[in-house]
Amino acid sequence: MIIDAQLIAEALLDIRPFDKGGEMTKKINDMMQIVEDAEAAGTGPVDRTSLAIVITGEPQACEVMAQAYTKALHGHGLIAGKSLSDPPALEKIDWPGDFEDSFISRQLQEYNHAYKTINEAKDRAAGGTLVIPGIHKMPYVGYVDEEDAGPKALNGALRAITSFMAEGAGKERTPVVILTGEAEPMAAFLAQQPEMQKLFEGKTLAVCTEDPAYSTELNDRITVRGPLKLKLRSPSFS
């Protein structure tokens, strides 16, 4: 497995303004143990479900953290592009905007429309990450004559997410799912969705919008010159 310490260092630098309590820093550093365990076991790709994450906080901060998390996964070799020179895909769904089409909802069942839309996004994100902001928001709120569309669309989307995460957990091309949103609504939403709660239980971290007061000891140990106990090779490390 190829380790790119520069990407990991960049990810750690990107998160510094938003990493509340150093949670993401620890998660990125813990990836090294995941890599070592996988290599020791001689197994295939790391379970994509174990890499899934929920990031809560202000939207812009969440977006930065999702991008940094993707960069760190790539740096550790846990996700990869189509070739070694290509970065992995980061696909972001516009939720619920991608699903709020009154014409389509009247022509197709909302459940099937949402299910298909999620799976198309999953295919575009193959080998990378699929970022879904605000999954806790109900689609079609305020749409005239569409009272039943929201729950159907939401159920279709959730079924697609839980299905491909379960069925493709051990496949390299299955994207890592990153959910983002406001802390309290996201927590309430996951509590009401047993299947989603099972997939994302214990995987929530909070971000802040100001420089947090936390130790940078973990950051300082990971540099391009001293990459995660690995020997220098150019341009990457293995």
Image: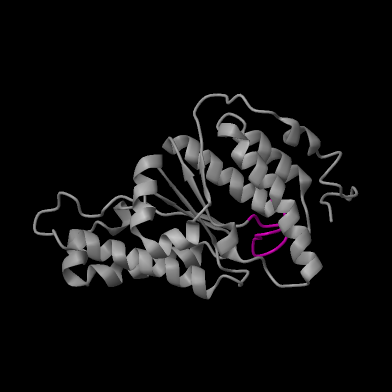
On screen, residue 144 versus residue 122, left or right, reads left
Q: Is residue 83 magenta?
A: yes
Which of the two residues, 216 or 107, is positioned nearer the viewer here?
216
Name the image quarter holding the C terminus: bottom right
Can residue 184 be seen? Answer: yes
Q: Residue at x 56, y 68 (%)?
A: 174
On screen, residue 178 versus residue 185, left or right, reads right
On screen, residue 124 versus residue 225, left or right, reads left
Quarter location, residue 100: bottom left
Query: Where is residue 49 shown, x and y percent of the image?
Result: 55, 63
- Can you name the residue that lies furthest to the left here? 145
Name the image quarter holding the N terminus: bottom right
Looking at the image, what colour scheme do you see?
A: one colour
- Number of marks drawn: 0
Q: Residue at x 15, y 49 (%)?
A: 142
- Can you name the residue that lies furthest to the bottom here? 167
Query: Where is residue 15 shown, x and y percent of the image?
Result: 60, 36
Quarter location, residue 65: top right
Which of the two residues, 190 or 136, is positioned nearer the viewer here?
190
Query: Where is residue 199 shown, x and y percent of the image?
Result: 48, 62
Query: Where is residue 123 shown, x and y percent of the image?
Result: 49, 68
Can residue 182 be seen? Answer: no
Q: Residue at x 64, y 48 (%)?
A: 71
Question: Relative to residue 97, is residue 167 depicted above or below?
Answer: below
Q: Is residue 41 magenta?
A: no
Would you say the magenta stretch is mainly helix, strand or loop?
A: loop
- Read off the magenta span: 75-87
On screen, residue 162 versus residue 3, left or right, reads left
